[in-house]
Amino acid sequence: MTTYAMVIDTITCIGCGDCVVACKTENKVPEGLNRDWVVEATSGEYPNLHTEFRSERCNHCSHATCVYACPTGASHYWKDTNIVLVAAEKCTGCKACIAACPYDARLIMRPEGYIDKCTFCHHRVDDGLDPACVASCPTHCMHFGMLDNPDSIVSRLLRERRHKALLPETGNEPNVYYLL
Amino acid sequence: MIEEVLVTARHNPKIDPSLGIWTWEISVYLFLGGMTAGIMLFAAWAMLTRKQEVLAFAHDRFALWAPIALSLGMTTLFLDLEHKLYVWRFYTSFEPTSPMSWGAWILVLVYPVMILQTLSTLRRGYPTLAGWLERIPVGGWVMDLSENWRRTIAALAIPLAVGLGIYTGVLLSALSARPFWSSGALGPLFLVSGMSTAAVIPVMVSRLKGERHFFETTDVGLIFLEVVLVSIFLISLATGAAYHLEALDLVMGGPFTEAFWLWFVVPGLLVPMVLAFLGLRGYRSFGLLASVLVLYGGFMLRYLMVEIGQVSTWTDYAVQFDPQLLERLTQ
Ligand code: SF4
Ligand code: SF4
């Protein structure tokens, strides 16, 4: 399995939300629905507070509970990669995958009713391009690439910088990383 | 302190601010699915032990209730689907990792056995219906066939019914993303609760005192077993990781405490257990009231489980727009 990862620098992210707009434009996500979102996480006690911005989306888990829960095979891995997609023409809208995703990263497409989610812009990845959110980030805090390639930007950043993934304790093996 | 706030809007309907993907349709389906399992089990048991005299209702008339209950349940299940025209996709593949796929295929096995089980009892239990069926070409032939094989059919019905009953609980407990459901007790609990809701039907409608008494006794035992399983369920959460403890808090002091204890455990389990016991002592009206409460409790169990499980989560953002913040700005 080829593993694609996204590495996002929480230090340089300013929480502008351009990634969200880029995704909506690129993927024609209907009004009121979102495939990605930005979280501002504040921790500590006043006055020693620490804030980090995180652009979040589906983690394209290597152990994707959503794929395992889907009764029809609509939720699947794309071309032997970790990119998780939903085949609309196989989806019954049973929502088992939504219940199975610990990150609440899925949405119900309107008005059709099939399930939709971040695709890591696989159509762009196919053309050798970065996902739209990564390509549009004005602070260049988002990076995309193959984890299997030790020379890729994502492998290099993960080697060099302190980082975390969200809720690794779910066992889902998430592939979106945050540099700290 | 750690506070996570969404900077950009994420108001995905039925997902934010907390999951609300499954509502009454799924609860009704889980309730009727469990009841169907119970009906099939009791009807098969009466058939296998040749109790046509003592358990006349269970032996001859009960089986017909199963396809009615299950078909109603399947209807509400269908109503829940968001992409309804693609419902047939359940049957274009079998996904061994997906409990829902198992459930879909179990139904394919359950339906024919359940129909044959009903047909094998139709002539004795519902002669008018059997008469109508006789008039359509293969009607008489299928009834003959199922009557000849009635004990084999009953024997097949038992493992299928157990599978169906347990499945309704496993469907939820397999979803590890919702900590409140992460308990192996849910499968057995839903099976026993389904049997209990089925057992009260003969208590309410059987004309034989002996049969009513048999099912009342059975039900007292089943409710007791249910209380034990609910306790095991709560204990398994209490001995879990932080996420399970948080999920348990929802019913132990949290927002669902009142609903769980005062709307489910007391009126749906404890009161009917006492009333059914009094019913056994000869107070028939207590027995009837107990039966109604058992049905209520069975539904509440599914309703609350579905509801609370969706609220329990791994991620917790402050996503709701809080108008108080605006007020503070203008002050
Ligand atoms: S984040 Fe959720 S939707 Fe995405 S792959 Fe993981 S489990 Fe599936
Ligand atoms: S809603 Fe669609 S993608 Fe999700 S589990 Fe059901 S069939 Fe699969």
Image: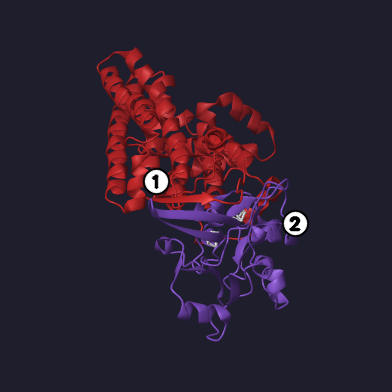
Comparing marks 1 and 2, which lies closer to the viewer? 2
Residue A63 at what x, y percent from top left? Answer: 49, 67
CB of mark 2 near ligand 2 (< 8 Å):
no
Visible residue check, residue B80: yes
Q: To which residue does mark 2 refer?
A: A28
Q: Secondary structure at mark 1?
A: helix
Residue occupying the point 46% across, 30% down: B60
Judge by depth and name the residue closer to the eye, B174 or B200: B174
Q: Chain of mark 2?
A: A
CB of mark 1 near ligand 1 (< 8 Å):
no
Residue B239 at what x, y percent from top left? Answer: 27, 50
The answer to whether B66 is drawn above or below residue A87 in the figure is above
The chain shown in purple is which? A
The chain shown in red is which? B
Q: To which residue does mark 1 refer?
A: B180
What kind of residue is marked 1? Phe
Residue B227 at what x, y percent from top left? Answer: 29, 35
Picture quadrant where residue A4 is located:
bottom right
